[in-house]
Image (cartoon, grey):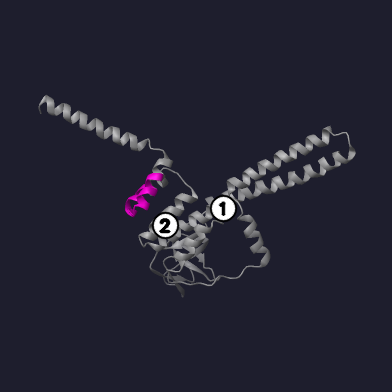
Amino acid sequence: MSYRNFISLLMFLQIILLHVGLKASEKPADKFDRANHFYQEAVYDSALITYQQLLQSDFESADLYYNIGNTYFKLRQIPRAILYFEKARKIRPNDEDIMHNLDLANTLIVDKIEPIPHLFYKVWWNNFYGLFSANTWAWVSLLLVSLTLFFVFLFQTASSVQIRKTGFFAGLFFLLTAVGALGLASQKYYYTQKVNEAIIFAPTITVKSSPSFNSVDLFVIHEGTKVSLIDKTGDWTKIRIANGSVGWLPADAYEGI
C-alpha cells in the first residue's frame, strides 16, 4: 500500500469514528426528535429503529411508548401497538390521545371481551388514583409537607389561641394528606415497575385448566388480547381475562406490559 493510500485510509477511518462518536454522544432528546422526523416523513422502519435505540439506552417515557405504539400501528403490527399503548397508559393513565389510539387498536383484534363492571367506589378510586403519575404524586406530597411545616411554624409562633388552634389542626390535616400522597406515589411507582398484565402474541392460543398441555381446554384467545398475570409455575402462567375467566398459558404466549 502506498503512503498516499495509507493516509487516505486513515482519514476515512477518522471520519467513520467521528461519525460514530457523534451518534454515541447524541442526546436522548435529539434522538427522539430524529425518530419523530422519520415518523412524520412516513419512514416508519427507521423511526422504529431509532425509538428502540432509546429504549435500549434506558430512556423511558409515556411519549416514547406512545410514539412506538403509533409506529407499530402504521406498520400494521396491532398486538405490538397495543402493547406499547398500554405501556404508555401505565405511566399516564388519563391521557386522551393514548386512550383513543388504544381503543382504536383494540377494535382491530379478534377478541371482544366484555369486562366485569366495577362497583362505583372502585371506579371512583381508580379515577382518583389515576389523576397523576408517580412523580406528580411525589411533588404533591412535598407541597403538602411544606404546608405542614408552615402551619407548625404558625402554631409555635402565633400569640392568638385561635390562630394556634388553626395552625395545629391545619398542620395535622396536611401532614396526614402528605403521608397519603406519598403512599400513592410509592404505590404508583411500584405499579409502573411491576409486570402484572400482558398482551397475547400467539395468533391463537387455548387456555388450559392447569399448567399442562394435557389438561382440559377452557377457552381460546387471540393475539392482541390483554390478560392479567396471577401466578406462575415453571413455564406456565395463570391468567385472567377481562370477563373474569381464569386459566393457564405457556409463558412464551405473551409479553408483559
Position of 24 compared to 247: left or right? left
Horizontal and vertical percent position of residue 54: 41, 45
- Residue drawn at (34%, 35%), measured in percent from left and top? 22
Circle nearer the N terminus (1, 2): 2
Q: Amino acid at mark 2?
A: Asn
Observer able to see residue 252: no
SS label for mark 2: helix
Residue 42 lies in magenta, yes or no?
yes
Measured as percent of width and height from the top left, residue 205 is found at 41, 69
Label 1 residue SS: helix
Q: Nearer the viewer, residue 171 or 203?
A: 171
Residue occupying the point 77% across, 46% down = 173
Q: Position of residue 60 (x, y in %)?
A: 47, 46
Magenta span: 33-50
User: Residue 233's x, y, as percent?
Assistant: 48, 60
Magenta stretch: includes residue 252: no
The image shows residue 13, relative to residue 244, as above or below, that is above
Dominant secondary structure (helix, strand or loop) of the stretch shown in magenta: helix
Whole-angstrom CA distance, mark 1 to mark 2, is 24 Å
Q: Which mark is residue 191?
A: 1
Q: Residues within 10 Å of mark 2 (few under 14, many from 20)?
A: many
Q: Residue furthest front?
A: 41
User: Residue reaching furthest left?
Assistant: 2
At x 78%, y 34%, the residue is 153
Q: Which residue is mark 2?
A: 70
What's the amino acid at mark 1?
Tyr
In the image, residue 187 sits, relative to residue 204, either above or below, namely above
